[in-house]
Image (spheres, grey):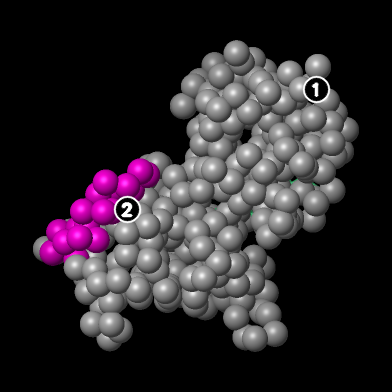
Amino acid sequence: MAYRVAVVGATGAVGREMLKTLYERKFPISEVAAVASARSAGVQVSFGEETILTVKNLDKFDFAGWDIALFSIGEAISGVHAPRAGAAGCVVIDNSSQFRMEADVPLIVPEVNPQAIAQFSKRNIIANPNCSTIQMVVALKPLHDKFKIKRVVVSTYQSVSGAGKEGMDELLANTKVHYVHDKNPPQVFQKDIAFNVIPQIASFMDDGSTKEEWKMAVETRKILDPNIAVIATCVRVPVFIGHAEAVHVEFEQPVTVNEARAVLRAAPGLIVHDQRVDGGYITPAEAQGEDAVYVSRIRKDSTVPHGLAFWCVSDNLRKGAALNAVQIAEYLVAHKMLANKTEKAA
Ligand SMILES: NC(=O)c1ccc[n+]([C@@H]2O[C@H](COP(=O)([O-])OP(=O)(O)OC[C@H]3O[C@@H](n4cnc5c(N)ncnc54)[C@H](OP(=O)(O)O)[C@@H]3O)[C@@H](O)[C@H]2O)c1
């Protein structure tokens, strides 16, 4: 069987990666549509090496008859169009934060909680978690299964592509003007991102944390275990693609570095690259274009009873967004969840 798939936000950083990922992984497609705003209607985007798609206007796009829509547009627009697509019988996999914490919308990382996908049928919407959450829970899941996590302290080093194509443009433009001893006033970021780091991603909340930090905590609990305490500090860094995280975990049970390494090595979606020599770890530049979540710098945290620290890196546009969404779609196909839906509707 092959499916009609719409990529909504197809001109964006994540949308383009979605088209690439669908093609590379040979997702069973009978027809693919590229959809974006009215501004991009008529623009051409490529799907694989031979197919050129003409972008359609989301406002006029009819989702009836489409099996899956991969959404990567902002929260507000997803809030309008994802329910419209779902009501038309199309299963939406949404990258925005609009629906993530809603009880009847599953929040899925296929390596971590695939069993929760089945709850999608009420609204036909499945949420993709935040990019920083995804890579962290892929690494935490096997450790939690074995040693039971109590608390996580994480500091992120997040690339500018996490803020979309405009974030990447701003890093490039601001870096260039530094060389002519000039400055660009920041527009996407709160301060100059060139040769700098910014301890703010998204807006502030009443308790002094940012929305990104809050998302990492609540999403981790929804995906993995509601009893895990999480405190995050999310920082934007002048890297184009790839998020890094320094993760400190406190467990209920004792854990040695060798045990943790063995558990992580056996887990799906993870590559352990941990050599205690110069350069024996993975950096964001090396993770770019790769599917895996990389774990390095595994060591004991002796400041708490059963503690472990590690470094975790992944391509935020791939595993942090497009790949995770496509893996969810693959799961729906492999478990005949789309076919069942069509049969029920018929
Ligand atoms: N970047 C990441 O690492 C990442 C990771 C996880 C989740 N996400 C989420 O994914 C979404 C997209 O992120 P991105 O990084 O791809 O952003 P982006 O590069 O700025 O792209 C935004 C996309 O949304 C489309 N869009 C904007 N307004 C629209 C409208 N009114 N109607 C229809 N389409 C509209 C844009 O189309 P036009 O070109 O026509 O404006 C473009 O295709 C966001 O919700 C983001 O939070 C991003």
Alpha-carbon span between mark 2 and mark 1? 42 Å
> Does mark 2's beta carbon lie closer than 8 Å to ligand 1?
no
Q: Nearer the viewer, mark 2 or mark 1?
A: 1
Residue 268 is drawn in which quadrant?
A: top left
Q: Secondary structure at mark 2?
A: strand
Give the percent coordinates (x, y) of residue 87: 84, 36
Q: Residue furthest right?
A: 60
> Residue at horizontal 27%, vertical 46%?
266
Figure disc tally: 2
Q: Earlier in the sequence, mark 2 or mark 1?
A: 2
Q: Is residue 64 left or right of residue 48?
A: right
Q: Are marks 2 and 1 in contact (CB under 8 Å)?
A: no
Whether residue 102 is visible, yes or no, is yes
Please tell me which residue lies in front, 195 or 67: 67
Q: Amino acid at mark 2?
A: Tyr
Give the percent coordinates (x, y) of residue 99: 72, 54
The reply to whether the magenta stretch includes residue 259 is yes
Please tell me which residue lies in front, 43 or 231: 231
The reply to whether the magenta stretch includes residue 51 is no
- The residue beneath circle 1 is 345
Numbered range of the magenta stretch: 257-276
Give the percent coordinates (x, y) of residue 39: 80, 41
Q: Secondary structure at mark 1?
A: helix
Which quadrant does the N terminus fall into?
Answer: top right
Please tell me which residue lies in front, 254 or 208: 254
Please tell me which residue lies in front, 235 or 113: 113
- The residue beneath circle 2 is 294
Q: Is residue 290 left or right of residue 228?
A: left
